[in-house]
Image (tube, helix red, strand yellow):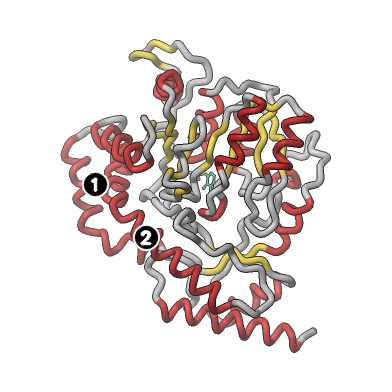
Amino acid sequence: MTLAINDLKRHNQPLETALQAAMARVLDRGYYILGPECTAFEHEFSSFLGTSWAVGVGNGTDALELALRALGVQSGNYVATVANAGMYAGTAIRAVGAVPCYVDVLPGSLLIDPSALSRVLDSSQVRALVVTHLYGRMVDMAAILEVTRAYGVPVIEDCAQAHGASRLGRRAGSWGDLATFSFYPTKNLGALGDGGMVVGGDESLHARLLSLRQYGWVAKYKSDYRGGRNSRLDEIQAAVLRAKLPFLDGWNARRRQIVRRYRAELDGLGWGLPPYPDEADVVHLCVLEVERRAAVQAALVDQGVGCDVHYPIPDHRQLAYTDGVNITLPVTEAACTRVLTLPCFPEMLDAEVDLVVQACSRAVQSLRGKL
Ligand SMILES: *Cc1c(COP(=O)(O)O)cnc(C)c1O
């Protein structure tokens, strides 16, 4: 038996009664798309975050794409983002015909580097910035906004890995001009299928997003906005997410606890440990940096400990999009060869954390023997 990095069955099973009641409510009502569950969840989620409004959409990548469209990003525009976050932002940027302008990250946190951002904004005509709160680590938004305001560049926070994170008492998603969430089942707040959300404070952006998620309509069968899509959060997923939202802060607290234990126990192995999660961070993935990653992975799997790599190929090295991307991002590229994700999910038992810790120590010992 292998301990997986995440276990969705163990996560959702304790909520079975509540989830079945939520789904039955939708079935009984006979209203399946853009009904009362979606509206209620939009209100509950925006009040959880402290934003004025929220718009439910089909998934997190659509959320990014629709946010870019709402800001008026067009074909041929440049959009700044990082290259170490799984290429979701890059996919959305390409979907609107724009071109990503990659910014390197800070060593250690692996989050966007504000001074690298300044250099990119100095040298290119950037139309928008997508900031990713990677692995649940929250970007210092005050520092980023100080840079972007000087250039008048609007900011989208990609919060797909940071539901509930906060800094200076403000949640991730309440800092940027717009912010996007994914409710993919493995996320800190996950549906039982696809789901996404765009949140913000500006009323004209709100109106545009309500329209863009449904064919550009401003009323039934009347399209005023270009670039409309069909991308909606369905009633079953909204009902499921409503049932789960009250537990989010508690789940995040347990995730932080697990990483704090890993940090204490794995100190001394010579690995790059994840930053100490303070209350600002929520830990989506427990990501370390190691030398000889493939050998470490093999040694862990041998001992029944699952692990994974988030993410192995930086966006600017993906074969799908190599046009015009003749850049080097030293920190990003080095990190992609070293990052390793250990099991971390709220239902994980202390005994399972111990098992992972022992497996890591043995992996290091056996690799030293093979040097
Ligand atoms: C998961 C994820 C997304 C995309 O969400 P989907 O719902 O799968 O489209 C976007 N950005 C980040 C950082 C993610 O982790």
Above/below status of 334 relative to 111: below
Of 326 and 306, nearer the camera is 326
Q: Is residue 194 left or right of residue 266?
A: left
Q: Residue furthest left?
A: 28
User: Please, what secondary structure does the residue beneath circle 1 have?
Assistant: helix
Q: Nearer the viewer, residue 128 or 61?
A: 128
Quadrant into which the C terminus falls = bottom right
Q: Label for residue 23?
A: 1
Determine whether 341 is above or below 358 in the image: above
Name the residue that disc number 2 marks.
251
| Label total for image | 2
Q: CA distance from mark 1 to mark 2?
A: 22 Å
Image point (34%, 40%), residue name: 45
| Residue 81 at x, y percent in the picture | 65, 39
Q: Is residue 43 left or right of residue 204?
A: left
Q: Is residue 20 above or below residue 11?
A: above
| Amino acid type, mark 1 | Met
Q: At 45% across and 78% down in the image, what residue appears?
A: 352
On the question of residue 319 being in view, the answer is: no
Q: Is 74 or 174 nearer to us in this picture?
A: 174
Label 2's element? helix
- The local crowd at label 2, few if under 14, some if 14 to 19, many if 20 or more residues have their Cα within 10 Å, is some
Report the side of 136 relative to 31 (left or right).
right
Where is residue 323? Give x, y as percent.
Answer: 79, 35
Of labels 1 and 2, earlier in sequence is 1
- Is residue 306 visible from the viewing direction of this image? yes
